[in-house]
């Protein structure tokens, strides 16, 4: 068997991909909490519109929405699906597509 398809090699590759994804998510969340990351223009405009429609103090609502984004909505979690993509590439998605197709067409 080709060494690139052996379980030991693939397991190590998946571990590396997962650790990298975990570090990226933790780095993003740390920068987000410190205020080093600014929300995009579309997000800020959306907040402005929501604050205007809320009928309460505009600046209080705007501050609340940004705080919620920094603490909840804007946080990132590492994705096992993307780590598997890093490991197996397009074969992971093709296999998933076949699985979904099988379930859709053979489920009664």
Image (cartoon, rainbow, N blue to C red):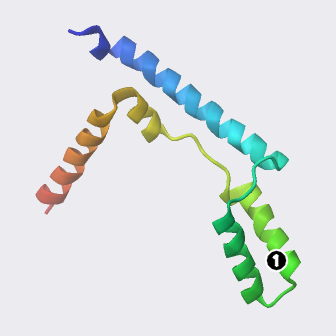
Viewer-closest of 46 and 67: 46
Residue 77 horizontal side relative to residue 71, left or right: left
The x and y percentages for residue 79 are 51, 41
Viewer-closest of 89 and 38: 38
Quadrant including the C terminus: bottom left
Quadrant including the N terminus: top left
Residue with the most extreme bottom position: 55
The x and y percentages for residue 64 are 81, 70
Q: Is residue 31 above or below residue 108?
A: above
Q: Is residue 74 above or below residue 81?
A: below
Viewer-closest of 34 and 36: 36
The x and y percentages for residue 48 are 74, 77
Q: Residue at x 31, y 13 (%)?
A: 4
Q: How many marks?
A: 1
Q: Is residue 34 above or below residue 45?
A: above
Residue that mark 1 sits on: 61
Residue 7 horizontal side relative to residue 2, left or right: right
* Neighbourhood count class around disc 1 (C-alpha, 10 Å): few under 14, some 14–19, many 20 upward: some
The x and y percentages for residue 57 are 87, 84
Residue with the most extreme front position: 41
Residue 100 horizontal side relative to residue 39, left or right: left
Q: Is residue 94 above or below residue 58?
A: above
Q: Residue at x 24, y 41 (%)?
A: 94
Q: Residue at x 69, y 42 (%)?
A: 28
Which of the 4 image quarters holds residue 2?
Answer: top left
Q: Residue at x 72, y 61 (%)?
A: 69
């Amino acid at each position: 068997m080709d060494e690139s398809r052996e379980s030991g090699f693939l397991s190590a590759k998946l571990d590396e991909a997962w650790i990298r994804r975990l570090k990226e998510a933790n780095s993003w969340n740390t920068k987000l909490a410190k205020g080093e990351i600014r929300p995009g223009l579309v997000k800020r405009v959306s907040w402005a519109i929501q604050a205007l429609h809320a009928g309460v103090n505009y600046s209080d609502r705007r501050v609340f929405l940004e705080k919620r984004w920094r603490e909840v909505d804007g946080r990132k979690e590492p994705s096992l699906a993307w780590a598997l993509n890093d490991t197996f590439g397009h074969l992971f998605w093709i296999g998933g597509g076949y699985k979904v197709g099988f379930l859709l067409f053979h489920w009664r």
